[in-house]
Image: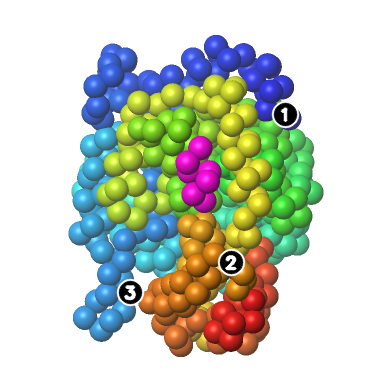
Amino acid sequence: MERREFLKISGAAALAAACAPKTAQSKGTKEEGPEQMVYRDNPKNGDRVSLLGFGCMRWPMIKDADGKDVIDQEAVNQMVDYAIEHGINYFDTSPAYLQGLSEQAAGIALSRYPRSSYYIATKLSNFGDQSPKASLEMYRNSFRQLNTDYFDYYLLHSIGRGGKDAFNQRYVQNGMLDFLRAEKAAGRIRNLGFSFHGAKHEFDYFMELFDSGEMIWDFVQIEMNYVDWKHADGVRNVNADYLYEELDKRELPIVIMEPLLGGRLANVPEGIARQMKEREPDKSIASWAFRFCGTYPRVLCALSGMTNMDPLMDNVKTFGHFQPLTPEELDFLEQMAVQMKEYPLINCTDCKYCMPCPWGIDIPGTFQHYNRAVTEGTYAQSKDQKDYAKLKKAYLVSYDRAVPTVRQADHCIACGECLSHCPQSIAIPGQLRRIARYIENLKQDLL
């Protein structure tokens, strides 16, 4: 569906009304405070869900006494306190996040509050072992880690990759889908849905299951942002405008993941940032992406994986004084999306599903460093480039600082272990080889 057609059908006035802030006291005041959070009503069950949700995939990390990466629980508690104080009530986690550490940290922080004051979303992330025993243990362990006796929103995690066969193996043949249906009937799951990564024909298959009544989804989680709205690759990922339209016409609540494309839409290339700041000098770059998601009324919640207080406070500000985008602003973002696609970025969202690499490579760290250099204009492209020597030195030095030498791209042996774990279907070994070649060419002045 074309954006203009959508707005024509919905009506600009109706869209704005649907997106207007709903305060806890319905005062409509402009003052900041927890009562200013925008809420969406889930038409399936009446849940009042904060339009901004807390994605628990990027909790802050620190080193323990042994030098191991662990979650900074004190910082997590502080962030959760601020989030709840300012009206955020939806927290999304998974057994797969942060190599199995996310759920426990969320459980510790959230269990300090009344259970009825927040919604927990977690997932059956049985990528590695689909056996009934392992899947059941993962499900039951989530209760223990999250200190709860029910899940508000439970997802079949990242279906679409591998299509029908993978879905059947992970959830049907092992009996887990029937088990989860029974758990829902028993009240231990309040809403059952799925998160999707895949191509159009794979998404259509899951919609066919819904239309036939074979599988009744209560909600669906999709990747949606102003770049993927019309500019997903169309092979491994489908345009979000299509996903939204299909879910909207079935009246299925939508939860949004990757509204910032792994942070790339909070740190856009300089030329794009300049245009955004000319239009909205007092608003953050990230706010454009969140307002885009919130403009669409079928969206129940937009998740943000916030690592520290700065993005949390900025996002609360965006949703505390939320303004849906106008048709003209939507057209502007489409222009920005077209410009974004001109940059040679790797479509990594820093989800870390590919980790740990059996050979110790910091895959997301390598990709994030490369993308940051391209975005910030510090990407050395040829010896004829202005300030080439300076850019070359800056890239090589910053790479060594960002990624330890033994964990850099040139150590990849292309074992392929990471490929099946990537929700973006990135050809990870190929991209690592490309970066390794680029760095070697930089060192030898062969660009």
The answer to whether any part of residue 150 appears in the image is no
Mark 3: amino acid? Asp
User: Can you identify the residue that label 1 sits on?
Assistant: 2
Mark 1 or mark 2: which is in front?
2
Q: Position of residue 189 (x, y in %)?
A: 47, 45
Mark 2 or mark 3: which is in front?
2
* Closest to the observer, 445 or 219: 445
Name the residue rendered at 28%, 81% in the picture. 67
* Closest to the observer, 44 or 29: 29
Rendered image: mark on residue 385: 2
Q: Which quadrant holds the N terminus?
A: top right
The answer to whether any part of residue 25 appears in the image is yes
Q: Residues within 10 Å of mark 2 (few under 14, many from 20)?
A: few
Mark 1: amino acid? Glu
Q: Residues within 10 Å of mark 1 (few under 14, many from 20)?
A: few
User: Can you identify the residue that label 3 sits on?
Assistant: 69
* Closest to the observer, 366 or 191: 366
Q: Position of residue 285 (x, y in %)?
A: 44, 41
Q: Quadrant of residue 400?
A: bottom left
Mark 2: amino acid? Gln
| Position above or below: 206 against 174 | above
Magenta residues span: 268-275
